[in-house]
Image (cartoon, helix red, strand yellow):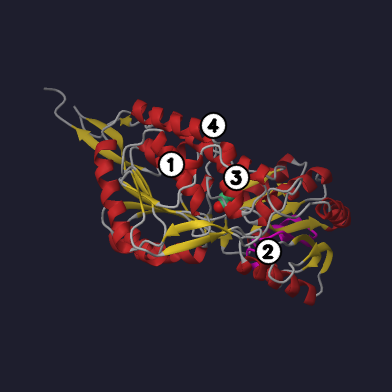
């Protein structure tokens, strides 16, 4: 691996400010593009997880006393280091996750933007003074850091899903224990190295790799952990929520989606095609806000389908470091199998493929699909595909498409394309989701509250709301003020 700053490639966990490998067992991390070994990380368990919580708890007691200015300065330094080392970070990210290098650089910029945002937000944890219900008294509300936060992050955004949790937590005065996805530990460890370089005190940000069940069970049952923040599948989110019930932890859950992308007959079709390209094919379709069901009005269905298929057929698939590649490998064989199941099911039930090719045996590269004549009974309509498949569903009117769009347990994101302001408001209001892109295919930004409703999760990340998630309100009734 050619890195300008070689210390960014760490194969040890970062616990209490030290780089450690406890125990002999190691996990092999491979490049999804070619199966080559990138390196190894320790397989740690419950004892090391408890050590992380001990360290974070101690660090929290100090960190909560620091000034907002101090926290802002350290976060700002972390941000600057991420920007300075973005080529190296993106190299590590592409190697372990597979996304094209340019996209990986985009993710590092996105990840750094959360650190920048919360370095500024650190100073704004304002309280309130409210009119009191009693004479000679005041109601004062202050905000205090919640405590030790346990974060469990996914492989699809190995950098951004970490900073979106860690930056507001640290800005608020909390300490963090983090378990990154088993597929992508090296980006997390590189971020920890930069946190160390930025001057974060020992124990404030700990990264542990290893046995997910053992570590997760410490994170969800240790009384000193006051919040669990998880991004990943709805299935695992439910398990973590159950496990956290005995100690009533605050939960932030960013879970699966099944996003509808609705193109009305009055839409700018070229803009809708551009929007679908990003909403569907970013990260090879492996994002929880990816358009999963593309509903197109009958009057513009063929035009949209043909224009989309033309663009999709031109997408170059391959190794993330190769020239002009925009679709890398999927993360693993399970991801490929899911795509194959959805495509085969659709084709068997009457759908047509305008383009696309399944992965060769043993490979993780899928040529992106556009499927037409989809119906709501097919697998792809009912489960998140998490791959480069654009399934097009035909619809005839607004009421019908709204009902179909909402007919899912998920409620994360939705997209609508229309030129009618009235329809944009009406449909956006009626969609049962946490986020709506209106004539926009990319909604993710540090400036906005990201999150879902229904089984897509709890809580919001990004914006000032993202920091409130790590703060507890304390109300004080101050009486006796006449004396
Ligand atoms: C995710 O897929 O979990 C996050 C996507 C994003 O931040 O855009």
| Residue designated by label 1 | 193
- Dot 4 falls on a residue whose secondary structure is helix
Q: Are marks 3 and 4 in contact (CB under 8 Å)?
A: no
Quadrant in the rendering for residue 228? bottom left
On whether ligand 1 comes within 8 Å of the CB at mark 4, the answer is: no
Numbered range of the magenta stretch = 381-402
- Dot 3 falls on a residue whose secondary structure is helix
Residue 192 screen position, x and y as percent: 43, 43
Residue 465 screen position, x and y as percent: 46, 40
Upstream in the sequence, badge 3 or badge 4? 4
- Dot 1 falls on a residue whose secondary structure is helix
| Residue designated by label 2 | 364
Spatial CA span between label 4 and label 2: 32 Å
- Dot 2 falls on a residue whose secondary structure is loop
Q: Residue at x 71, y 47 (%)?
A: 278
Q: Is residue 383 magenta?
A: yes
Q: Residue at x 88, y 57 (%)?
A: 302
């Amino acid at each position: 691996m050619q890195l300008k700053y070689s210390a960014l490639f760490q194969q040890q966990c970062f616990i209490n400010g030290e780089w450690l490998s406890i125990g002999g067992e190691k996990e092999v991390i491979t490049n999804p593009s070619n199966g080559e070994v990138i390196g190894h990380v320790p397989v740690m368990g419950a004892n090391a997880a408890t050590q992380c919580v001990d360290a974070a708890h101690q660090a929290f007691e100090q960190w909560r006393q620091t000034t907002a200015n101090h926290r802002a300065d350290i976060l700002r330094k972390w941000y600057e280091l991420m920007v300075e080392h973005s080529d190296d970070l993106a190299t590590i990210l592409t190697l372990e996750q597979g996304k094209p290098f340019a996209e990986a650089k985009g993710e590092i910029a996105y990840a750094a933007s959360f650190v920048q945002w919360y370095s500024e937000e650190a100073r704004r944890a304002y309280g309130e003074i409210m009119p009191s219900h009693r004479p000679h008294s005041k109601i004062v509300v202050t905000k205090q850091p919640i405590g030790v936060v346990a974060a469990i992050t996914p492989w699809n955004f190995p950098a951004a899903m970490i900073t979106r949790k860690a930056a507001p937590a640290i800005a608020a005065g909390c300490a963090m224990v983090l378990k990154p996805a088993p597929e992508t530990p090296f980006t997390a460890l590189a971020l920890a190295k930069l946190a160390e370089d930025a001057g974060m005190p020992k124990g404030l940000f700990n990264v542990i790799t290893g046995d997910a069940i053992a570590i997760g069970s410490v994170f969800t049952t240790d009384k000193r952990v006051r919040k669990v923040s998880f991004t990943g599948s709805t299935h695992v989110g439910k398990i973590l929520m159950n496990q956290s019930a005995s100690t009533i932890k605050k939960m932030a859950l960013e879970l699966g989606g099944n996003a509808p992308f609705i193109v009305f007959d009055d839409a700018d079709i070229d803009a809708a095609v551009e929007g679908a390209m990003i909403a569907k094919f970013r990260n090879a379709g492996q994002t929880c806000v990816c358009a999963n069901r593309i509903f197109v009005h009958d009057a513009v269905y063929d035009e949209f389908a043909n224009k989309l298929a033309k663009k999709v057929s031109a997408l170059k698939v391959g190794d993330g470091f190769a020239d002009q590649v925009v679709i890398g490998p999927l993360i693993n064989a399970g991801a490929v199998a899911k795509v194959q199941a959805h495509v085969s099911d659709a084709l068997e039930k009457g759908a047509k493929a305008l383009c696309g090719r399944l992965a060769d045996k043993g490979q993780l590269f899928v040529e992106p699909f556009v499927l037409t004549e989809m119906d709501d009974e097919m697998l792809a309509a009912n489960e998140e595909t998490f791959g480069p498949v654009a399934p097009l569903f035909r619809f005839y009117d607004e009421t019908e498409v709204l009902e179909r769009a909402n007919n899912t347990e998920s409620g994360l994101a939705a997209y609508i394309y229309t030129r009618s302001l009235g329809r944009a408001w009406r449909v956006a209001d009626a969609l049962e989701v946490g986020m709506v892109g209106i004539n926009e295919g990319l909604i993710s930004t540090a400036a906005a509250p990201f999150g879902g409703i229904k089984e897509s999760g709890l809580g919001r990340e990004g914006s000032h709301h993202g920091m409130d998630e790590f703060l507890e309100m304390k109300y004080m009734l101050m009486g006796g003020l006449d004396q």
